Every structure is written in structure tokens, then in C-alpha cells.
Amino acid sequence: MIMPTARSLMVTFVSALIGLPLSVTAAAAPTPTDWKIALGWNRTVLPSFGTSVGPFTPPAGAVPISQKLAAASTPSSDLGRPGGVFICTDLDWKGKCGYSVPPLNDCVLLASPWLDAISSFGPDPGSTCFAFNTGNCDQNEAQWSFTFPGDDTGGEATTNPWNDQITSFACVPS
């Protein structure tokens, strides 16, 4: 004899209570989808966008220490990984796009085709990325910063646009 599960007993009880046929059951909760997939990402993880040029320390006060400690232990999820970055060479997440997960607190000097060509920049949840128009990630020269879900406008509506100007970047836990 097969024993009914608690769920099947509840469905039977509720169906009888409100007069629904037994074939109607509660819908399963939707599975979270990685935000990049909705933009057309094919799940390819690139080994790198460029060359590591050394450690990076964020500007003082840029990321509270409590957030750093929490994010450092944040595991990967269906929404991405802390430090993961999705970039595209055109506005609106178009053109050549790529995804990579450089180490947190590491300065990445971009290589072709990304060098001075990024128009959409999106970090995964759990990190803040600082971008530079120089190649050394000098914390005092950070021109731009990005948090999830990023920016696909090249900053063109701001007083400090960054379209096709990013030479290096570094992400830290947030």
C-alpha cells in the first residue's frame, strides 16, 4: 500500500474544502534564473578578460567591513557569484559579450577585445567593482563603480560617462 504524502493529503483536503477537482494542484515555485541568461548569455565562463596586475584595496569607506565579511562567505547562487562580471562592447548588453569571475580584490588590466571598448558592465550580486581609465587600479583614480545589476548605458546620461573608456577594473566584496 502506498502511503499518501502530507502534500497530497493537504491538496485533497483543500480541494474538498473549496470544491475544486483533485487534478488542480499548487504550482511549483519558479526556479531562479541567472540574470545574464535573460540577456542571452550562453553560460560560457571566460578564464579572464585580461591580465592580473596585482592586488587592489578599495578606497576607504567605499565598502563597509561588515559587508565585506558577509560577502566573502557568500556562495555561488543561481544569480551568479560575487566577483563575477558580465560585460559587453555595445550599449543595452549587445555586441560581443563575455562573463568571467576574476579573484576579488584583484586588478584586471583589460585585453582585446575589451580594452577601452566596454559599454555595458554588470557585476553579479555580492560585489562592487571599481573601473579605471588607467591600467593600474590606483584606488585614488577610480572613475566609476558598479554594483548589481550594473549599467548598460555607458553612463551617457551622467556627468561622468564611461562608454569605451575602461582600461582596468577590480571587484571587492560588498
Image (cartoon, rainbow, N blue to C red):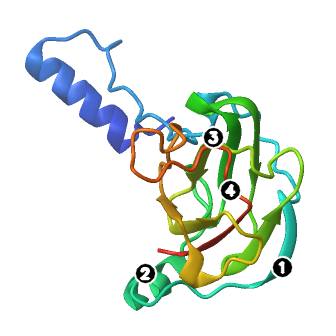
- Mark 4 → mark 1, Cα distance in angstroms: 15 Å
Looking at marks 1 and 3 on the same chain, the residue that comes earlier in the sequence is marked by 1
Q: Are marks 2 and 1 in contact (CB under 8 Å)?
A: no
Q: Can you tell which of label 4 and label 2 is closer to the viewer? A: 4
Looking at marks 3 and 2 on the same chain, the residue that comes earlier in the sequence is marked by 2
- Residue at the spot of label 2: 63
Where 27 falls versus 23 (above or below)?
Answer: below
- Residue at the spot of label 4: 166
- Mark 1 → mark 3, Cα distance in angstroms: 22 Å
Give the structural element (helix, strand or loop) at label 3: loop
- Mark 2 → mark 1, Cα distance in angstroms: 22 Å
Residue 76: image quadrant is bottom right
Q: Residues within 10 Å of mark 4 (few under 14, many from 20)?
A: many
- Residue at the spot of label 3: 119
Task: Give 9 or 77, whichever is nearer the viewer.
Answer: 77
- Residue at the spot of label 1: 53
